[in-house]
Image (spheres, coloured by chain):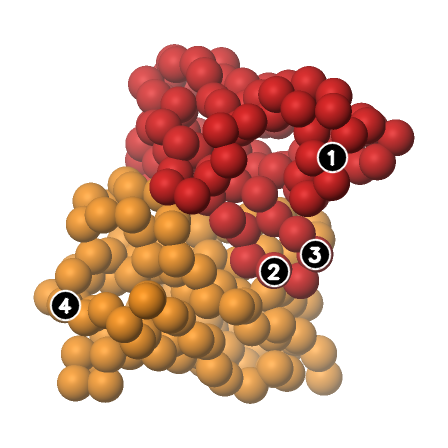
Amino acid sequence: DIQMTQSPSTLSASVGDRVTITCRASQSIGTWLAWYQQKPGKAPKILIYMASNLESGVPSRFSGSGSGTEFTLTISSLQPDDFATYYCQQHYTYWTFGQGTKVEIK
Amino acid sequence: QVQLQESGPGLVKPSETLSLTCSVSGDSINNYYWSWVRQSPGKGLEWIGYIHYTGSTSYNPSLKSRATISVDTSKNQFSLKLSSVTAADTAVYYCARPKNAETSAPVVHWGQGSLVTVSS
């Protein structure tokens, strides 16, 4: 099984901050990586697929990068609507998700 | 607009079988691979398995053959059965559709989620 590890688990930030979340895969997955945002009581919402492709309708302040085993999600200027939990997911072999990173208000 | 809706009992007794159905609207089930994903506080998001309208399936090996996914094309629905449940199977269960017709495509459509509690 491919394991996905995110860091940090929790991140405290302020509106306007640049935020970076890291995701590491236990083996190379090329660029078969997606990022999701989830708010309490809601299903996850896709932000990025194939490591760096922005899903339609997602604000351009979100960006993704990386390949192989190390990936990052960056929010260039954190907005009030962005306080949520973020998950990475490998979609190379079936689906495996990271454990999540909660972005909270500092 | 694609919509997925889970339905089924919210409470299941230990050792019994959990059964959920996902009704798909705004899209034909005769496309894509349709999946079940669950989310619990202890294990986070976990892919359970998928089914193609032809009946082809694949499952997460960690479920040790307890999961069975079936499809009813006449009703535009697919279903999940999970046998021999324990408290560890308590979770929110989501049905999901990927971005395209590839088995490995990421999820773009989710149901609203169905909380299933395993308890006597």
Residue type at mark 3: give it.
Answer: Pro
Q: Secondary structure at mark 1?
A: strand
Q: Secondary structure at mark 4?
A: loop
Q: CA distance from mark 3 to mark 2?
A: 6 Å
How far across and how far down the image is residue A65, in percent?
45, 16
Give SS at disc 3.
loop
Q: Name the residue at 42% across, 43% down.
A: A57
Can you say whether B39 is above or below B115 in the image? above
Q: Which mark is residue B30?
A: 4
Q: Nearer the viewer, residue B41 or A11?
A: A11
Residue B3 in the figure: left or right of residue A83: left
Which color has been applied to chain A in this rendered view? red
Q: Residue at x 37, y 41 (%)?
A: A56
B111 or B73, which is in the foreground? B111
Label placed on residue A103: 1
Q: Where A59 falls versus B9 (above or below)?
A: above
Q: Are marks 3 and 4 on the same chain?
A: no
Residues indicated by labels 3 and 2 sit on the same polypeptide chain: yes
Q: Are marks 3 and 2 in contact (CB under 8 Å)?
A: yes
Labels 3 & 1 near each other (Cβ < 8 A):
no
Query: How many C-alpha atoms fall within 10 Å of the one at disc 2: few (<14), some, or many (≥20)?
Result: few
